[in-house]
Amino acid sequence: MAYKATKKKSVPRKSAKKKTVKKKLSTAAPAAKRVRRKKKAEKAGAIQDRQWALPASYCAGGKGWATLRDVVDPDVPTMTFSELSAKQRAELVAKRIAQQPKFQIAMLGAGLIDQKRAMAEVKGQTAIGRALMEIEQRVINHQVTKAFRSEQPKPAKKAKKKKTAMNLR
């Protein structure tokens, strides 16, 4: 007797159409939840309000902190990050970390670093602290360039050339 090869017959499944429903901001939701939803809807390229208030450098002469708003303002004399001493850089990064409400960062080899440990590492100028300083330097530079770009007027778009019989040849 010959055996027939048996194949599983694939039965097409009916796909249930899922409707995507956009959630509305109801007044029944708690205020904190409504704020979170609004923040998600904010423009991705915009600088957050709390970033404007964080220190980004020192005022000229090393007297006092200069916020991001001060650094971008051409009327306020500030020092660039490269003009700062190692001690000033460490103080600046520690101040920025201290002013952030929730600071946690995960690093390979170091694990999860909380706010207190990060400030101690930066002030101690350890390898982890120097890495955190490098990260903050890049964040500051990125925020400053983004702020300068947002203030610059956008160039006018070039007018398109009309195609004529002379251009087509």
Image (cartoon, grey):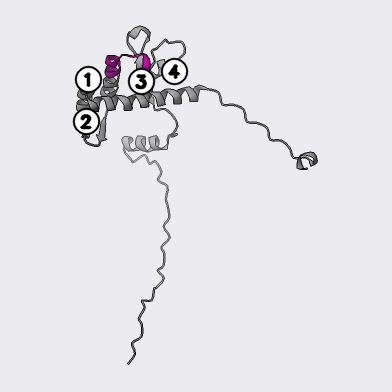
Q: Where does residue 134 sit, x and y in percent of width and height?
A: 32, 25
User: Which residue position is annotated with label 3?
Assistant: 53
Q: Residues within 10 Å of mark 2 (few under 14, many from 20)?
A: some
Q: Nearer the viewer, mark 3 or mark 2?
A: 2
Tag shown at residue 114: 2
The residues colored magenta run 81-91
Residue at 39% x, 73% y is: 11
Q: CA distance from mark 2 to mark 4?
A: 30 Å
What secondary structure is the magenta-colored segment mainly? helix
Callout 3 secondary element? helix
Residue at 56% x, 26% y is: 154
Q: CA distance from mark 3 to mark 2?
A: 22 Å
Q: Earlier in the sequence, mark 4 or mark 1?
A: 4
The correct choice, above or below, for 117 with respect to 160 in the image is: above
Q: Earlier in the sequence, mark 1 or mark 2?
A: 2
The kind of residue tagged 2 is Asp
Q: Residues within 10 Å of mark 3 (few under 14, many from 20)?
A: some
Question: Which picture quadrant has residue 8?
Answer: bottom left
Q: Earlier in the sequence, mark 3 or mark 2?
A: 3
Q: CA distance from mark 4 to mark 1?
A: 27 Å
The correct choice, above or below, for 121 with respect to 87 in the image is: below
The kind of residue tagged 4 is Val
Closer to us: 139 or 98: 139
Tell whether position 107 is magenta.
Answer: no
User: Which residue position is annotated with label 1?
Assistant: 123
Callout 4 secondary element? helix
User: Which residue position is annotated with label 4?
Assistant: 72
Q: CA distance from mark 1 to mark 2?
A: 14 Å
